[in-house]
Image: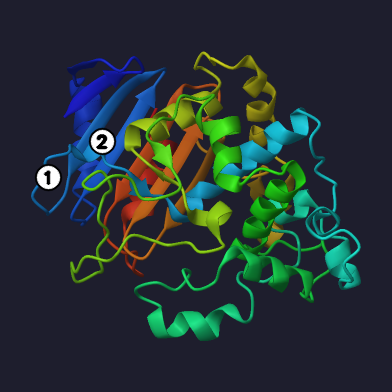
Amino acid sequence: MTEMTAAPVTVPGTPATARVLAEAARAVDAPDLVLAVSRNGVRTVHTGGSAEPGPVPRELMAYELGSASKPYAGLLLARLVAQGRVRYEDRAADLLAPGFPVHPAVRRITLRHLLTHTSGLPGLPADFYPQAVPRWSTDPYGGYPADRVVRAFLRARPRHRPGTRWHYSNFAVSVLGHTLAAATGTPWEVLLHQQVLAPLGLDATRVRPGPDGTDAVGHRRDGTPVPALDTGGFTAAGAVRATPLDLLTFLEAHGGGAELTDPALAGPLAEVRRPVLRRGWRHAHTHTLTWFHHPSPYGPVLFHAGATLGQQAFLGFRPGTGLAVAATATRRVHRADTFVATAYALLTETP
């Protein structure tokens, strides 16, 4: 158990925070588990799990974020809008394939629709499943490359008129990534690094596996290791890998308390914190451009969870209070899984 300042300097963990994290960790069964909390820039990290620790400390391993990659896409879009390079209301088809004949509903889909899951697109393209099902537990995305994602979008028939319904869509956020790459003439990976990762000092965050021994290994429910995730053409929706310490840096920047080395990020960071829509029964669930936004006894919380074939991640923060929570685990999610609930409770129930 260690407590770290953003420097990062390792100092003894405070007993109160250490006890909270140790107790929370008992509720999660995973080969590798990291629960990391930042309070006004002072970090407490608990590591554990059923597997023997390897030569690289768990908090220094890079974990697959899955859908928790989407806040990175959201911040990238907000920054490009602030720079005047794109607009939220730009139509994706016009940027991807100017003049190409598409369905009228596809023509109306904007960058904002893609990011906020209001495009009318399904969660994944219809023709994704035939190639994915035979390798669903090993490599469902790797055989569906970027050009195929773009073609599926251009020939799509949205289920609902864009902007009228919320439907979570990896397909839509992936299209956003390809659209931003086309609009800027810059590959997604390079764009993300230039506009988000480098300015925030996220040196241990990437979208591809790193050197041998530096990436956490995911596991099935029975403990069998699974190969590293290949997201194919769905990079923007789920390809980010990061260490828990880098996750805290990312969240601290969003919380408003961290000093930014690039002041131009202040506006985009504020933009992605702002609620923009409501959904669900009685419209009880609020969302920003890219974060789920819930009330708590200590003020609003913003969060996003993600899962891959053998890993899980949770990112969350409470704006204005200095609290951020990052959690990772290396076991595939299942129906009775406690990981997300445990991390969410650290965010919402901790004074």
The amino acid at mark 2 is Leu
Name the secondary structure under disc 2.
Answer: helix
Q: Is residue 32 left or right of residue 199?
A: left
Picture quarter containing residue 203?
top left
Residue 65 vertical placement versus 55 (above, below): below
Of 200 and 28, the residue lying toward us: 200
The quadrant of the picture occupied by the N terminus is top left
Residue occupied by mark 1? 54
The quadrant of the picture occupied by the C terminus is top left
Of 138 and 44, the residue lying toward us: 138
Picture quarter containing residue 38?
top left
Q: Residues within 10 Å of mark 2 (few under 14, many from 20)?
A: some
**Where residue 303 appears, x then y in whole percent?**
51, 43
Along the polypeptide, which appears first: circle 2 or circle 1? 1
Residue found at x 75% / y 67%: 120
Name the secondary structure under disc 1.
Answer: loop
Residue 161 vertical placement versus 211 (above, below): below
Q: Is residue 141 left or right of residue 168?
A: left
Residue occupied by mark 2? 60
**Where residue 51 appears, x then y in whole percent?**
11, 53
